[in-house]
């Protein structure tokens, strides 16, 4: 027969074991990543460009839109910068943890190659990245602000207007 102190000790140990198991589970959970098919297109793209987008109402009738968002400008990304853009975008997605309900994107990534297209429409304000393969939305992923500096710098270097905040 256990004493009250024995029951308390057993309960505390059980709670500690449960908390440790939960901590290990949360640490080992899979971080979000770009889908494999999208990552493959980005890695082997013949065409790779960044887009500056105007947030606001969807305007699918206009000639230069990106999934309905008006394109303010486009910048071809040189080969040496492509891997960095993909890496920092993947890193931002891997560390994304939450998304707002709004979606007012100002950035886009477009890549084409191997007979496929990969597109990412990014709203850093809302922490969302909508990912498309061949024009079909695959998923919406959380994203941090981490890629923004590189994307803005790359667009600015080519004289593309980033719009206003």
Image (cartoon, rainbow, N blue to C red):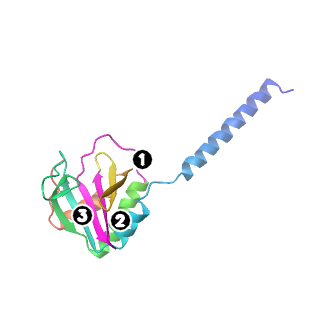
Q: Are marks 2 and 1 in contact (CB under 8 Å)?
A: no
Label 3 crowd (10 A; few <14 / some 14-19 / many >=20): many
User: Element under label 1?
Assistant: loop
Q: Are marks 1 and 3 in contact (CB under 8 Å)?
A: no
Work out which residue is located at the far top of the displayed protein and give it: 4
Distance from Cα at disc 2 to Cα at disc 1: 19 Å
Label 2 crowd (10 A; few <14 / some 14-19 / many >=20): some
- Quadrant into which the N terminus falls: top right
Q: Which residue is mark 2?
A: 86
Say left or right for 11 vs 58. right
In the image, residue 131 lies at what x, y percent?
34, 56
In the image, residue 157 lies at what x, y percent?
19, 67
Q: Identify the residue at image location x=14%, y=65%.
A: 159
Instruction: Give residue 50's mark.
Output: 3
Label 1 crowd (10 A; few <14 / some 14-19 / many >=20): some
In the image, residue 128 lies at what x, y percent?
33, 49
Q: How many marks?
A: 3
Give the image quarter of residue 71.
bottom left
Work out whether residue 142 can be spotted: no
Instruction: Give residue 97's mark.
Output: 1
Say left or right for 128 vs 3. left
User: Does residue 39 lie above or below 23 as drawn?
Assistant: below
């Amino acid at each position: 027969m256990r004493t009250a102190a024995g029951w308390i000790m057993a309960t505390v140990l059980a709670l500690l074991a449960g908390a440790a198991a939960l901590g290990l589970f949360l640490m080992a959970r899979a971080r979000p990543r770009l889908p494999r098919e999208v990552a493959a297109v980005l890695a082997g793209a013949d065409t790779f460009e960044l887009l500056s987008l105007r947030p606001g109402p969807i305007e699918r009738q206009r000639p230069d839109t990106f999934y309905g968002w008006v394109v303010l400008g486009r910048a071809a990304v040189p080969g040496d910068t492509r891997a960095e853009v993909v890496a920092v975008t993947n890193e931002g997605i891997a560390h994304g943890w939450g998304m707002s309900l709004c979606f007012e994107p100002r950035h886009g990534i477009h890549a084409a190659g191997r007979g496929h297209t990969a597109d990412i429409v990014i709203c850093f304000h809302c922490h969302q990245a909508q990912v498309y393969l061949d024009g079909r939305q695959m998923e919406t992923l959380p994203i941090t602000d981490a890629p923004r500096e590189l994307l803005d710098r790359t667009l600015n270097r080519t004289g593309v207007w980033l719009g206003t905040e």
